[in-house]
Image: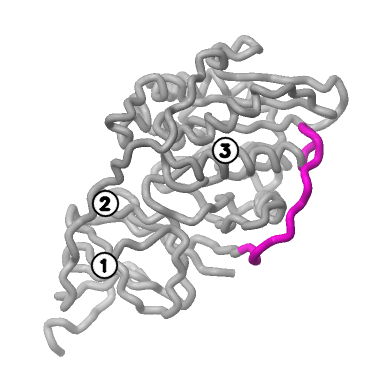
Amino acid sequence: MSCASKRQHSGKSTYRFRTLSEVLPPPLPALPHAAPEAPPPDLTQWVQGNCGIRGVHHFESHKPGPHIAVTALMHGNEYAGADALAQILATPLQPTLGRLSLIFLNLEAYAAFDPRRPSQFRFVEEDMNRLWMPELIRSAHSSVEMRRVRELLPVIDTVDVLLDLHSMTWPSATLLLTSMAERNLLMANTLACGQAKPPQVVLDQGHPAGPRLIDYERFSDPTGTARACLLEAGQHWTRSATEQSLLTARIFLAQHGMIPPLPVPAPTHSCVHAMVTDCVVAQTAGFAFIRSFMGGDIIEHAGTLIAIDGMDEIRTPYNNCMLVIPNLRPRRGHTAVRLARVL
């Protein structure tokens, strides 16, 4: 057996192999640092909200129906969704049934955002989208983000259907993320099918660092009825991410009777569905992809080399493996990419 022969890591990993690789990892790409294509939106008139909670705008039809919510600014430097909400708020809103809430989440992080350093200011003290665990919320744990979660919880706990707007650091296809509950998959599929160019729909079991808003028990409990999904609208600070956020939010609101119906365009291609099977975590500071993959890339053949991590090779575990939100410069201990099987 040669020194370069492969032997799989213990622990039954299907994608990580220990080897003296014959492939040298390429230099790490620079962090995206392009100037924002559009300036951050001025949210001054929307910060106070209209219902006694900062950043929360609530509208009543005074008729029976579900509570529908759209959230944005979970991360302070992801303002495409906030721009979309500001544009929606600038038009008259009168739900035809039920209730509507439009929510700007991490206002403190957004207030600190500096376009000269756009990759920073994701949060103030900790990632707000890893805190949606009831036991943690009830604990003594405290931070800027945790206090905001507790402030918003009375609203979130009454929401029946929620769309959470995000964007991504690296170039990627648009996608809708859902938890494993079938009702959330159906919601995402309906939302995707309302678009001429449907986003990819990806199911996963949550983030290893902590539960996201869409994983909060109200939306992920197998016996529950409330639904949620997360839009990744494209790369941060691009006009296309704002346009995608606005389009998806409007379709979502129209589908639930919050705004007048929109025309349903003929799809230009079929919707791609995939299920996350593995979360690849960088175990060394030298983790590097062999090339600059884009999120949503589908690798045709099992066993294809995609990255080097110290003495390990990362290979696709099956045919038609989708790369979900690859981080081309992951820090040690952080997620580098999620691997998903196309359904």
Q: Is residue 329 left or right of residue 156?
A: left
C-alpha distance separating marks 3 and 1: 32 Å
In x, y percent, where is residue 142? 39, 20
C-alpha distance separating marks 3 and 2: 25 Å
At horizontal 26% and vertical 67% (from top left) the residue drawn is: 290
Answer with the quarter of the image where residue 165 lies: top right
Identity of the amino acid at label 2? Arg
Q: Is residue 266 magenta?
A: yes
Q: Is residue 183 magenta?
A: no
What span is colored magenta in the figure?
255-271
In x, y percent, where is residue 65? 83, 31
Q: Earlier in the sequence, mark 3 or mark 1?
A: 3
At horizontal 30% and vertical 74% (from top left) the residue drawn is: 305
Label 2 with label 1: CB-CB less than 8 Å: no
Instruction: Specify the principal SS of the magenta part.
Output: loop
C-alpha distance separating marks 2 and 1: 12 Å
Answer with the quarter of the image where residue 217 lies: top right
Q: Which mark is residue 290?
A: 1
Q: Which residue is mark 2?
A: 329
| In front of the other: 221 or 94 | 94
Q: Which residue is mark 3?
A: 164
Q: Earlier in the sequence, mark 2 or mark 1?
A: 1
At horizontal 52% and vertical 52% (from top left) the residue drawn is: 174
Give above or below for 290 relative to 83. below
Identity of the amino acid at label 3? Asp
Q: Is residue 305 left or right of residue 132?
A: left
In x, y percent, where is residue 140? 41, 20
